[in-house]
Image (cartoon, rainbow, N blue to C red):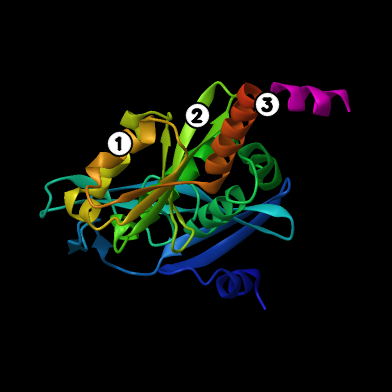
Amino acid sequence: MRATTSFNKMLALPALTVTNVTVGNGTVILDIRHTRPLLRCPCGWSTRVVHSRSTRRWRHLDCFGMKTVLQGEIRRLSCRSCGRVVIEDIPWARPRARHTIEFEQLVAWWTQRSDRTTVATALRVDWETVTTIISRVVAEQLTDARFDGLTRLGVDEISYAKGHRFLTIVVDQTSGATLWVGEGKNAATLGRFYELLGPERCKKIEAVSMDMAYAYPAATRKATNATICWDPFHVVMVRHEALCVRGRVRDPPCWSVVADR
């Protein structure tokens, strides 16, 4: 079996065929060619007329431990629908991307399970490339549909940069899915989430659990029908502190005896 035939079977990418295979310096370069005659604009309009051509490379999933690169011609068209000269829709890569969709999905999967530096080292790409890919994948797949049917929310913050910076995290208490992450931990930060949610969805929120700081309850007023629920950890902590204060005020001798023991 010829190498091109083997790679065509292994790749199984839409609308392309492998015409040549070059191996060298730890890299597999696959020359590819479009198989569909029509040029399709991202807006949906199609034509057979090519405005201009150029060559582009896309990083693909590694093959036998070697970097795999697709190299092929991209065509531009003058779209009569949107009035622009644009690059045709590429089925195997996202717009303006230099990596295939499969490679970007792999980066996104690993980033959910490890830090970006580790992912960049393992996949042999730059740290900035990982960041760019994450932004592109999230922008495509994170839609407002995740806000439909929400009734119970959980809000909390986490710190990073040695405790000097904070992120506010909102989760769906029913499914456990993370809905939104925003920089900061004040009322304005959480307010951005409720603005994104919209007034109609806010009315359907029945309960929001959070800690006992002032900022989050103030922002949650936008969810007019929501009951604010203090999380058990902070309730127990406040109760414990109150009992300690009461004990010190009412029965100081008892505390001194316990301390002596």
The reply to whether discs 2 and 1 touch (Cβ–Cβ < 8 Å) is no
Residue 45 is inside the magenta segment: no
- In the depicted structure, whether residue 230 falls above or below residue 64: above
Q: Looking at this rendering, what residue extends furthest in the bottom direction? A: 1
Which residue is label 2 attached to? 166
Which residue is label 1 attached to? 219
Residue span colored magenta: 251-261
In this rendering, the label closer to the viewer, 2 or 1:
1
Quarter of the image with the C terminus is: top right
Where in the figure is residue 137, as x and y percent of width and height?
A: 44, 51
Q: Residues within 10 Å of mark 2 (few under 14, many from 20)?
A: some
Secondary structure category for the residue under label 1: helix
Where in the figure is residue 203, as x and y percent of width and height?
A: 21, 54
The CA distance from mark 2 to mark 3 is 41 Å
Q: Residues within 10 Å of mark 3 (few under 14, many from 20)?
A: few
User: Which residue is rendered at x = 29% and y = 51% of the image?
Assistant: 226
Secondary structure that dominates the magenta span: helix
In this rendered view, identify the residue nearer to me: 130 or 224: 224
Quarter of the image with the N terminus is: bottom right
Of marks 2 and 3, which one's residue comes earlier in the chain? 2
- Is 212 situated left or right of 4 in this image? left
Which residue is label 3 attached to? 251
